[in-house]
Image: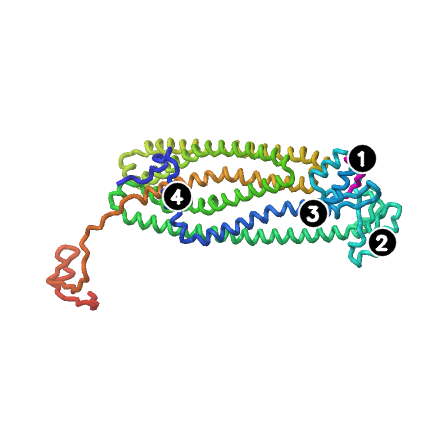
Amino acid sequence: MGLIGSGEERRENKTYDVKIIRWLLGFAVPYKKFMVLSLLFMVLTAGLELVVPYLTKIAVDSYIFPSWRVARFSDGQADKEFEDKLKKRYPESVIRLSDHSYLVDTSKVGREDNTNLEKLGYITEERYLVVNVSELRTEKLDEARKIIDKHSSLFKSVGQVYYAEYSSLKDLTDQEISTLRSEEIKQVARLALILFFSLFLVFVFSSLYTYFLNYSGQKIMHQIRLTVFSHILSLPQSFFDKSPVGRLTTRVTNDVNAINEMYTSVLVQFFKDIIVILGVLAVMFYMNPTLTLFILALTVLLAIVAALFRMRLKTVYRNVRRTIAKLNAFVQESIRGIVLIKLYIREKQNFDRFREINRENYNANMDQLFAFATFRPIIEFISIFAIALILWYGGLSVLRLELTLGALLAYLAYIRMLFGPIVELAERYNIFQSASAASENLYDLMQLEPEERKGIKLGEIQGKLEFKNVWFSYNGDDWVLKNVSFTVEPGETVAL
């Protein structure tokens, strides 16, 4: 019969066994539909979280930040080809002002064409307010015409389109600007509504995801605890003579809780983190491949730091669990044997031994604290460096029209979404380590052979209770019962 409780030491250099994983998954199979629902709502939550920064990008680029600028071309063949290509590709975003002169909505023009407009000197620095009166709502049309007529010296027109340099609009009131930009304001309001609805769905899906995840986790934990306790009851007496009660209690309570935390905080959340990381990288690469490659290099560096931290934490966490197990067992055995300790006057020796074990536990926890204390600042430094890189390179890209302002703001949001899961993956590793050690201990316990039932099974017993010539006393000859005889038949009740 094996001795329980030394799993931390025995599996120090052993990998996580596939048999143990299979054993644990067996408890999850009855609740797989809840796990699948949790996974589904988690994917929906992650997808909507990715949409939110992109909606901000659209609002800034298309409606908030002025994106109309004037492009002028010469009579050269190369200019003529580029001019024709621009008009063909973006018919709704290019408005002809005169020969070889156009208003261009740079937020709708592709990144490569925007770069060429800037590098070849076609585009002007000045930004324009463009009002297409044919697109205004009826209630705003007359009011807009009055404002344009009032400031006619500022506005020029091409058909139904009026435009003016933003730098010249200082004399217009806020109300007049709002009227002229009523269509943009309406679109921003529509995006804000979509954003609010998306956040509401994130709340709903996140709540459902959390509920189904924790419901299945509690069910699994409940079943594991029943199975383990039932198995403990089936073990022979000799097992309990050799196994500390404190460690058996830990198996049924703390170890089961550690496994539940792995189910709810590691396994399913791991899939969400992977989806978020891949989704963020895909969106960032779509917006600007060059800047994304820089960020990807930092992400690899962050992953390396997280891996080194994980390796360090593995050793540290093993030591913490080992010392906690020793501490619990020693306290349990000391309290149980307190009578013998006092009988043999061993209080000082036991206290000195406790001090040694407590010091080991203190040192192990300080090592763990130091590991976390160094890991977090390194991660923060890399994150700040990444933000600084985005502001520097992204800012230059905005000036060169290689990146829009909205995309830059989206990048800053996505960088937090990217680094967060990577850090959490590393920090959740200690939860996985705890759960793996706990599941190894439980698995070892479940492999112990239960006591073989060799007793004779009694059949149905029918009989009666008979007292015959019974004498009984508490003190000497002071008899309470004297030669008492009586019979109690099945189903009868007799009071003396």
Q: Which residue is mark 4?
A: 21
Instruction: Measure how far apart labels 4 and 2 are at the Cα level.
Output: 73 Å
Res. 66 visible in picture? no
Residue 59 tag number: 3
Looking at the rendered structure, the secondary structure element under dot 4 is helix
Front disc: 4 or 1: 1
Q: Which residue is mark 2?
A: 145
Which comes sooner in the sequence, label 4 or label 1?
4
Residue 76 tag number: 1
Looking at the rendered structure, the secondary structure element under dot 2 is helix
Which comes sooner in the sequence, label 3 or label 4?
4
Instruction: Measure how far apart labels 3 and 4 are at the Cα level.
Output: 48 Å
Tag 4: amino acid: Ile
Task: Tell me where the magenta segment starts and ends, as one range.
Answer: 67-78
Percent x, y of residue 66: 76, 44
Instruction: Measure how far apart labels 4 and 1 are at the Cα level.
Output: 71 Å
